[in-house]
Image (cartoon, rainbow, N blue to C red):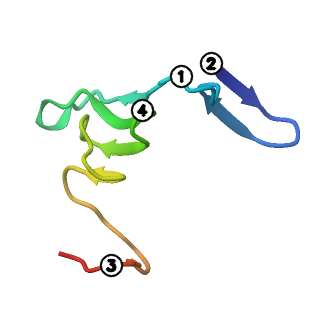
């Protein structure tokens, strides 16, 4: 379920890609707005939540975001 490699490719793999629904969670000591996880990766829906345990989009951020550089979109923003 967890594969850690350092030799030729530095990566950490969670899940086996065999259809198992293995979510990845990073807990937060601060718990903003009562949310226990800073990062929530839902393997069943392929969605990522930041301070959001029920992301409704591919990437869902609950709270402020800071972007340095260019923000690119393929559709309308709004």
Mark 3 touches mark 4? (CB < 8 Å): no
Q: Position of residue 30 (x, y in %)?
A: 23, 32
The mark nearer the N terminus, 3 or 1, is 1
Mark 2 touches mark 3? (CB < 8 Å): no
Q: Disc 2 designates what residue?
A: 1
Q: Pointer 1: residues within 10 angstroms few (<14), some, or many (20+)? A: few
As helix, strand or loop, the secondary structure at mark 4 comes to: loop
Residue at image position (37%, 38%) is 39
Q: Nearer the viewer, mark 2 or mark 3?
A: 3
Q: Position of residue 18 (x, y in %)?
A: 63, 26
Q: Disc 4 designates what residue?
A: 44
Residue placed most toward the observer, 34 or 49: 49
From mark 1 to mark 2, how far is it between C-alphas? 9 Å
Mark 1 touches mark 2? (CB < 8 Å): yes
| Residue 15 lies in quadrant | top right
From mark 2 to mark 3, how far is it between C-alphas? 36 Å
Residue placed most toward the observer, 36 or 18: 18
The mark nearer the N terminus, 2 or 3, is 2
Q: Pointer 3: residues within 10 angstroms few (<14), some, or many (20+)? A: few
As helix, strand or loop, the secondary structure at mark 2 comes to: loop
Residue placed most toward the observer, 13 or 65: 13
Residue at image position (70%, 25%) is 3
Q: Position of residue 22 (x, y in %)?
A: 49, 24
Q: Pointer 2: residues within 10 angstroms few (<14), some, or many (20+)? A: few
The mark nearer the N terminus, 3 or 4, is 4
Q: Which mark is residue 20?
A: 1
As helix, strand or loop, the secondary structure at mark 3 comes to: loop
From mark 4 to mark 1, how far is it between C-alphas? 8 Å
Q: Nearer the viewer, mark 2 or mark 4?
A: 4
Q: Which mark is residue 75?
A: 3
Query: Which quadrant holds the N terminus?
Result: top right
């Amino acid at each position: 379920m967890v594969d850690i490699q350092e030799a030729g490719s530095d990566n950490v793999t969670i899940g086996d890609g065999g259809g198992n629904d293995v979510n990845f969670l990073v807990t937060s000591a601060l718990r903003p707005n009562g949310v226990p996880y800073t990062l929530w990766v839902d393997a069943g829906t392929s969605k990522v939540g930041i301070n959001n345990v029920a992301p409704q989009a591919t990437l869902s951020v609950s709270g402020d975001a800071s972007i340095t550089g260019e923000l690119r979109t393929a559709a309308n923003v709004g």
